[in-house]
Each structure stands twice: as structure tokens, then as C-alpha cells.
Amino acid sequence: MPDNTAPDHPDAERPTSERLSPLHQIHVDHGASFTDFAGWQMPVSYGSDLAEHHAVRNAAGIFDISHMAEISVTGPDAAAFLDYALAGRMSSLALMQAKYSLLLDERAGILDDLIVYHNAPGEYLVVANAGNHDVAVNELTSRASGFDAIVTDRSDSTSLIAVQGPRALEILEATAGLAVMDGLQSFADLKYYWSTGATFGNGTVFVARTGYTGEDGFELYVDTADAEALWRALEEAGTPFGLIPAGLASRDTLRLEAGMPLYGHELGRDIRPAQAGLGRVVHFTKEGDFVGRAAAEAGLPDGSRMLVGLVSDGRRAGRAGYAVVHGGTPVGEVTSGALSPTLGYPIAMAYVDAAYVEPGTVLDLDIRGTMVPATVTALPFYKREKN
């Protein structure tokens, strides 16, 4: 699933923020180090972000992402309202289906990227990034004017746990007290970007086969009062399968390898969807107007840079803000970069001038005054093998 910022360093010190996850004590008990993340104190790692990264690629990791914003949209006009408020066609969603979409401003700049679930007749769940919570709630509330639709912020009463990795399905099926609903025989029947209700103890859980790691996995929306019990049950079931807690540092390298954009890095108000390779998310064929439509249809301004992947040799990776150079002239800027734990070589995403986006183009990264050759490559860098 989408996220709003990345930790500056995996060994970040504890912040002064007072906002704690409902699962905070569990993270403390596991020896987590914390970082200030969109006003929340969240676990950045539990000792080794590399071990956490490899666990997700090879077995499974469990993430606390309770800082995300959950917004309910209900009413007879809920679908029509979301078609107007967002760039995608939400009215085409089947019941229990999910879709990635964008919240645009009038200039077609990206205010947030989010996931929308059609979770009940006449009801949708919009999941926004933590750092854009207020923007998303305020914009959706404002845009609902004139529609028979109610926008309700459910963030404080909802916790979100992600189980990601090739053993994720086995872990959910082995979790004591967790049982699938909505006519499915098992969680194996749940397709990618679909969701289902489930029971857990005396409560219910909304389970989606979605994630932000490039692996198979599930995201579980649960009442905050039941979050700790669900985490412990998932962890107990997952231990034999190699499940370990994973923090924000590994989440960032996982999503980077999978070529998934991060708000505040690859996405922002000054970025149009087409620049970020997200032109497909904007549905110009849907009837009626939507916020940002006219600006998006007008095309990109002259000189707009485009998002590309870059790979290089050695061990030195380009980082956010580093210049991309061609023939001694700056032609772009890195938005995210790391030494890929899975691939073993440096990778980065960057916005570069349109003349240099062809895969195979050789550019240079200015890494603290040293020019390091980097080759443009198609995204993603890593794609999991599907069974």
C-alpha cells in the first residue's frame, strides 16, 4: 500500500512526538528503534533492517501501519462523488474490489495517492497517507458538497497491520481465531486487490490482499481495541514460517525495489500523474468532470521531467536530492535511492529531462562530488515470481 515519507536513517533517534500507535508497547518489547513519521512515533527497525527486508522477500514480515488514514464514504451518491473527487473511476469497482487512485488539485498536481475499497453496498473506504491525513479529509469533505454522500474520518478507531511475503497466506490461514467470511472458503480465494470480511474473536476484521512491498501479502484493518490481540495471534502463527516484525526502513527499501512511488519523494503537488508514470490511473473516459481533469487533459508543461529508474555498479547509491548529470550538465534529480538488499547493486528513482528517459541511456550521479555512471532502466527493479 501507498506511504508518505521515508525515515532519514535506519538508526534515527527517538522523536519528541507524543502520538503513539496502539501497538507501541509491542514494538518497545521487541526492542524497536523509533522515528518521527508524520507526527507518529513509529518503529524504524527492530535491530537489523536488512534482516527484516530479506525476511519479507523470503518468508514474511509483519508491519504496523496504523498511522495511515482511513476515511469512510457512504451514501447513495458515494460512487458518483468519488468519480468526481478522484482521478479514477471508482463507480466501476465491484463489491469488495480495491483500486489505486490519485487525489489531484485543479492543476492536476498530486495531493495524495491512495487506495479505495468498495467494502459494502453504497460504502467505500479511502486509505490515505499519514502525512496527508488532513489534506485528504478536508479535500474529500469539501468536494462532497452537492452529493448525497457522507465523509467520515475513521482513522482514530482503526488500526492497520500488514503481513507481507511469500508465506503470508499460510500465516493468515494458521492464525488462531481468524476466519474468512463473505462466502470465501479460505484466504487463498482472495485475489490481488480484492478484500473480504473476517472474524477475529468476537470482532471483525477487514482483510485486503494488498501491500507496499512488491510481495504477496495482506493488510488487515481492525478496531483499535482488538489490534494488539490480532498482532500477537499473527505473530504466534507466523513464527514457524519465519515471520518477524519489520519497520519503516525495510518497508522503504522493499517499495523502492518494487518501483512503488513514495509521496514526498516521487509524488507531490508539483508532479503530474504522467510524469510519475501514473497516466493510466487518470480515467479520461469516465463521464462528467473530475477535479484536475482540464489541466490533465491539457498535457504536461514544456520541460517537464519524467520518472525513471537508474542502476549503477559498486556500492555507492544515489540519495534523494543528488543531481543526475549528462555531459557535465545537471539533467535531473534523484528522488529515492539505496543499495538494493535483494539485487546487490545500487538503484534509484529520479526525475530527468525527457531527452534522457530511454532505457539504456547512461547518465552520471553526482555522489558528493564524484561522478558515478548510472544506466536508465525500466521500473520496477524487482518483480516477484508468481506461482
Image (cartoon, helix red, strand yellow):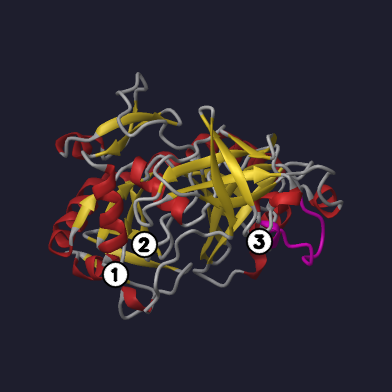
**Contact? badges 3 and 1 (CB < 8 Å):** no
Q: Which residue is mark 3?
A: 79
**Residue 169: assigned label:** 1
Kindly indicate the quadrant of the structure image that contains residue 74. Answer: bottom right
Q: Which residue is mark 2?
A: 218
Q: Is residue 76 visible?
A: no
Q: Amino acid at mark 3?
A: Ala
Residue 186 is left or right of residue 1, and the answer is left
Kindly indicate the quadrant of the structure image that contains residue 360. Answer: bottom right
Q: Amino acid at mark 1?
A: Leu
Q: Label 3 neighbourhood size at 10 Å, few (<14), some (14-19), many (20+)?
A: many
Q: At which x and y percent is residue 368?
A: 51, 28
Disc 2 secondary structure class:
strand
Q: At which x and y percent is residue 168?
A: 28, 65
Q: Give me the residue at 77% from left, 53% from top.
A: 290
**Contact? badges 3 and 2 (CB < 8 Å):** no
The count of marks equals: 3
The magenta stretch spans which residues? 278-290
Mark 2 / mark 1, whichever is N-terminal: 1
Residue 138 is left or right of residue 192, and the answer is right
Q: Label 2 neighbourhood size at 10 Å, few (<14), some (14-19), many (20+)?
A: many
Mark 3 / mark 1, whichever is N-terminal: 3
Instruction: Pick whichever, 196 or 299, lies toward us.
Output: 299
Q: Give me the residue at 41% from left, 51% from top.
A: 345
Q: Amino acid at mark 2?
A: Phe
Kindly indicate the quadrant of the structure image that contains residue 145. Answer: top right
Q: At which x and y percent is residue 181?
A: 34, 72
**Contact? badges 2 and 1 (CB < 8 Å):** yes
Mark 3 against mark 1, which lies toward the viewer?
1
| Distance in Å between CA atoms under marks 2 and 1 | 8 Å
Instruction: Pick whichever, 59 or 88, lies toward us.
Output: 59
| Rendered view: 282 above or below 323 | below
